[in-house]
Image: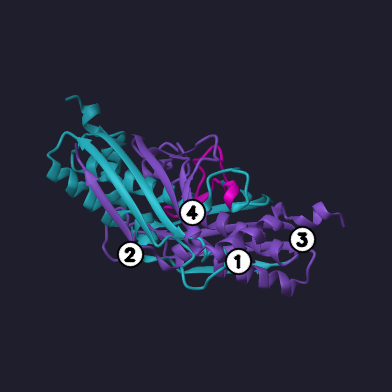
Chain colours: A cyan, B purple
Amino acid sequence: MSAVTDTIRNGVNTEQLFATLDLIKDQPELAQFQFRVSNRWIEGSHNRSTIKGFYAAGGEDTSRNEEFVIDAGEPAILLGTDTGANPAEHLLHALAGCLTTSIVYVAAARKVQLTCIESTLTGDMDVRGALGVDDEPRNGFQRIGVSFRVTGNAPAEKIREVVERAQKRSAVYDMVTNGVPVAVQVTTD
Amino acid sequence: MSAVTDTIRNGVNTEQLFATLDLIKDQPELAQFQFRVSNRWIEGSHNRSTIKGFYAAGGEDTSRNEEFVIDAGEPAILLGTDTGANPAEHLLHALAGCLTTSIVYVAAARKVQLTCIESTLTGDMDVRGALGVDDEPRNGFQRIGVSFRVTGNAPAEKIREVVERAQKRSAVYDMVTNGVPVAVQVTTD
């Protein structure tokens, strides 16, 4: 195996990964990050987020050249015109993406070369809550199911360990399972 | 005011909105929905979700003509190449989108014509948790801040009531603040 393929595993630069971990161990104050989203209502259930700047490692990160633009919407049955996936689907995407990246990084660190990660996520919702028809069902999903298929050059047992470790370290899995305090402010002029 | 502008408020068909609420009150079993996301790893922190089918109102909904495709990634400092917003940013987008649509629907139902909804969301994270450097900081955001600017043809007090009601009914706000049980399954072949 060449030095390059040894350093880059699953598309992750493991040398840089371990250097980042060492740096943050030495200087924990560099671990304070802030991510941000700006959103603007367009019409009905159509709104749009723009995402670019963030704070990381002691300063404003300016490495991103372009902003990401993501639209939200609702299907017809929820009074929209499919201008984008709906917000609950975006939450499932956030969870899928974070678990998947966590699996990739943990596998890279543990010298597991992955060949495939596929997942399907389901979220069950009683929409009486969110529509305000009934106070009993909660507004959000009652439960989320995640089904992964993960393959690579390691025994099944090791791959399962990688997935378990990734689950224990995923930022979005933590937020979705444990919740986060949210403070909402409003101005009206 | 014409009948049409009276029915369509904030881009929401209020006649259809109230008909939907009445239908679900009469037949609560129609309120069971299931949303779904399929995700596939591409390379490194790059993965992609596709979103189309969902279950709603007693059957599989087939009204969507095209699937939504959403990419995730990480910035350079988190070992990616900006192939998309990162999963934690997607979660903020989900929250922004859901609160915004909830405001629009509640305002439509309460005869408030909105002129603007803008929001900025921030999420503070100590990345030592997610990177596995330290067990003490949690993996996800310690807190999320949401700052709304909402204007429309109603007194500030009424607009604030609309936002409060929307917050009480938002599916993603419920999930992000209270958490959801998540069951993860893995196959390795």
Q: Position of residue B85 (x, y in %)?
A: 48, 44
Alpha carbons under labels 4 and 3: distance apart? 25 Å
**Callout in the foreground (2, 3):** 3
Same chain letter for marks 2 and 4: no
The local secondary structure at tag 4 comes to: helix
The local secondary structure at tag 3 comes to: loop
The residue where tag 4 is placed is A88
The amino acid type, in three-letter code, at marker 1 is Ala
Q: Is residue B87 visible?
A: no
Alpha carbons under labels 2 and 3: distance apart? 43 Å
Same chain letter for marks 4 and 1: no
Q: Chain of mark 3?
A: B
The amino acid type, in three-letter code, at marker 4 is Ala
**Callout in the foreground (2, 4):** 4
The residue where tag 1 is placed is B166
Alpha carbons under labels 3 and 1: distance apart? 15 Å
Q: Chain of mark 4?
A: A
Alpha carbons under labels 1 and 2: distance apart? 31 Å
Residue A158 in which image quadrant: top left
Counting residues from the start of the chain, the first of labels 3 and 1 encountered is: 3
Q: Residue at x 36, y 41 (%)?
A: B79
